[in-house]
Amino acid sequence: MVAPYIFKIGKLEKIKIKVMSTKLITLLSILFTGVFCSQAQSNDPHANHDSAITGITSEKILMVLDITVKDSLKYQQYRLKAEPLIEKYGGIYLVRSGGMAFDIDSERKVTPVEGNWNPNRFIILQWESMEQLQNFASSEEYKAVAKLRENSASTKSIIVKKYQ
């Protein structure tokens, strides 16, 4: 049987042990903070770092659309049916321009600044994630409505990650 060692320590030794314990705790705190912070860093200084903390990426997705309306009556039907679906699936309109006759504010026209780009209708939608956008685009509800857009307008669209 091993007997525990009992040391008699004086006041000075107790102070030294307390100082060493405090230094060790401080060092461990600094080390932990450094490791935790390095996990949150990325090569992109503008990246959203929520994923390092929660494991969930929160890079917002923007869908940019340049639409040329060919049949404004059919396109209005599309718009009226698509808007609630976009909202239902979490999409947010950031830009809605074009000055169409059915717009609430007919003065929202696209103003060309340079080059020959002058979209008939220009829209930017924001989605919380690519998955959210894909859920919207692949839903049976939207697929049925999308036919109205396809038959009333030609669309050029791109998807980009929001710069943060």
Image (cartoon, grey):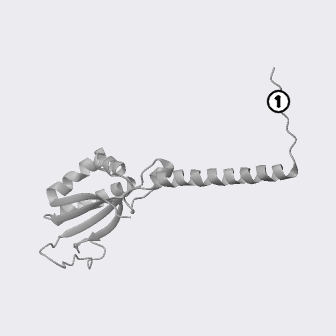
Horizontal side, residue 51 vs residue 82: left or right: right
- Local packing at callout 1 (Cα closer than 10 Å; few below 14, some 14-19, many 20+) is few
Where is residue 152? Give x, y as percent: 16, 59
In which image quadrant can residue 103 be found? bottom left
Q: Is residue 76 visible?
A: no
135 relative position to 20: left or right: left
In this view, the residue in front, 29 or 146, is 29
Q: Residue 8: image x %, image y %?
A: 88, 41
Q: Nearer the viewer, residue 2 or 95?
A: 2
Tell me residue 23's x, y (percent). 69, 54
In the image, what residue occupies the spot 72% across and 53% down? 22
Q: Residue at x 38, y 64 (%)?
A: 164
Residue 89 seen in this snapshot? yes
Q: Is residue 44 above or below residue 2?
A: below
* Quadrant where the image shows the N terminus: top right
Kind of residue sitting beneath label 1: Pro
- Looking at the rendered structure, the secondary structure element under dot 1 is loop
For this orientation, the residue located farthest to the top is 1
On screen, residue 77 above or below 52: below
Q: Quadrant of residue 123?
A: bottom left
Question: x, y (%) of residue 14?
Answer: 82, 50
Would residue 120 appear left or right of 11 to someone viewing this image? left
Determine which residue is flagged by label 1: 4
- Disc tally is 1
Indicate the quadrant where residue 128 lies.
bottom left
Most foreground residue, 35 or 121: 35
